Image: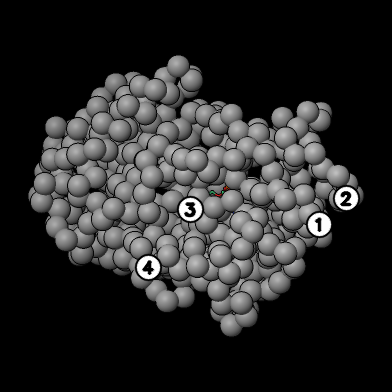
Amino acid sequence: MTEVTERPSFAGRLYARGDDGYENARRDAIWNGRRPDRFPDLILVAANADDVVAGVKLAKREGMKIGIRSGGHSFSATGVRNGGLLIDLSQFKDIEVDTAGKTAWIGPAVRANELGPRLSEDDLTFPYGGCPTVGLGGYILTGGYGFNGKSLGAAATNLKAFDMVTADGELIRVDADSHPDYFWAARGGGYGFFGVIVRMQLTLHDAPKLITQSMITYSVDDFEEVASWFLDSLDTFDPALMTLVFGHRSPPDFTQNVVSILATTYTDDQERTDQILKPLVEAPIFSKAVFTQIGVPGTLQEAWDQVDLLYPEGHRYLSDTCWIDDRGYAGFVAAAKPAFATLPTTGSHIMMNPWIPYERDDSALSGTTKLPFHIYAVGEDASQDDALQAWIDERMAPVLPFSNGIGKVNDSDLLVRDQSVMSAANAERLEELRRKHDPEGRFHSFLRAGAEG
Ligand SMILES: Cc1cc2nc3c(=O)[nH]c(=O)nc-3n(C[C@H](O)[C@H](O)[C@H](O)COP(=O)(O)OP(=O)(O)OC[C@H]3O[C@@H](n4cnc5c(N)ncnc54)[C@H](O)[C@@H]3O)c2cc1C
């Protein structure tokens, strides 16, 4: 453990390992009930940007590496490493909206369900993620695949400017013109970003006047037919229709595996909503549905409430993910079916939510395709972990040959299965920029095997 020669005073709290409050602060930084045995030497629960500047300077003086926590929802708890300093930004909750300019400055620990109600007051919106309690800091950096995202774009590309503390402890303002390297890296660089963002300016959008939810459930025996129809239809879906092939167990007794098409529409009127829902109800497979609920008007909060049911706090989450190659889905459906048919626990689930391929000069975000494959195993006790990991490994194996070899950083566990999380060119550029702006490696990068400390 690093011994600190001199502790600066902070407006927030600095905990050393062994201090009262240290373990609470460490556990609080990890939403997943499957908390890793990794222990930073110091945890700084920062109160303001000056604390962050002083924390980075302390780490530099003491030769410590830095991990970062905003909302604490990284599945793999990537910010919590062995040794060094964990900078906890959970107090950074300010929200300041410029209604006329359609922008907002927010603290990185603001959660979707804290920003949502504030923006709704002004009929504005942002491509929030499905989980209401995810921190917008990590969500935006990792891409941010959210509500109405096919129309509004990934959250990362709606990051307009930010204030950050560099590896030298300097507080700077970044936008497309000032410090473009940082701007590019933050927009999709994910857990590989090399600085601490203390405030973010977001591009906002007009809120849709009508949100509807639909659910069409099929027996898992019909998976091939459902998935084949869905993949054949992908390109015909309206961007304002966010769909999801969802493998889950069916209520109320949660013993049957089923596959549901979930669909949310974001429009301004009923006529357009009806129009864009048409492909779902006119699908040849529709008559085989065992449950249907079409176009029920709802609110953002109701959508979050439903997602929240999937992710009870304290449960143990294991996940893996990959982007499916766009060059054709022949063979993929058969390869994916065993995963849908063998969910190991009540809460375990699979998602395929169509997306948009990204390759832009202004963002590190890349490697995405039209379809991600996400697999989540959910347990309640540590004794289940090995079996759940084995299930994921076994069910991912036949799917991987159909992927483009790139994972989704926010749901990939790179300790279990290392893979790139952006295009090769962008991964290389990110590392070049790290060498330039963080030559001493002050900030932890992606949590891969051998990088726990
Ligand atoms: C239940 C659940 C549902 C989810 N749903 C979605 C979804 O619908 N769409 C989607 O895209 N993602 C989703 N995610 C993934 C989520 O976006 C990522 O896990 C994200 O990283 C969480 O952000 P956080 O700030 O809460 O995480 P944290 O654990 O606090 O941060 C993770 C890492 O992000 C980086 N980071 C965070 N804040 C900063 C900062 N201020 N400055 C510099 N680096 C920073 C650091 O590397 C940090 O270690 C979901 C996750 C969960 C647990």
- Which one is closest to the eye, mark 4 or mark 3? 4
Classify 83 as above or below 442. above
- Badge 4 or badge 2: first in the primary sequence: 2
Mark in the foreground, 3 or 2: 2
Judged left or right of residue 13, residue 178 is left
Marks 4/2 in contact by CB < 8 Å: the verdict is no
Q: Earlier in the sequence, mark 3 or mark 2?
A: 2
Residue 411, image x and y in percent? 43, 45
Given contact means CB atoms under 8 Å apart, are the residues at marks 2 and 1 in contact? yes
Residue 278 visible in the snapshot: no
Is the shortest distance between ligand 1 and the CB of mark 3 under 8 Å?
yes
Q: Residues within 10 Å of mark 3 (few under 14, many from 20)?
A: many
Q: Amino acid at mark 4?
A: Ala
**Marks 4 and 1 close (CB-CB < 8 Å):** no
Question: Residue at 75% across / 39% down in the picture?
Answer: 2
Mark 4 or mark 1, earlier in chain: 1
Q: CA distance from mark 4 to mark 1?
A: 34 Å
According to the picture, the residue beneath numbered tag 2 turns out to be 8
Q: What's under tag 2, amino acid-wise?
A: Pro
Please state the total of marks drawn on the protein image: 4
**How many residues crowd mark 4 within 10 Å: few (<14), some (14–19), many (20+)?**
few
Percent x, y for residue 295? 32, 52
Q: Residue at x 16, y 46 (%)?
A: 332
Give the residue number, with chain letter if any, for mark 4.
425
Beta carbon at label 1 within 8 Å of ligand 1: no
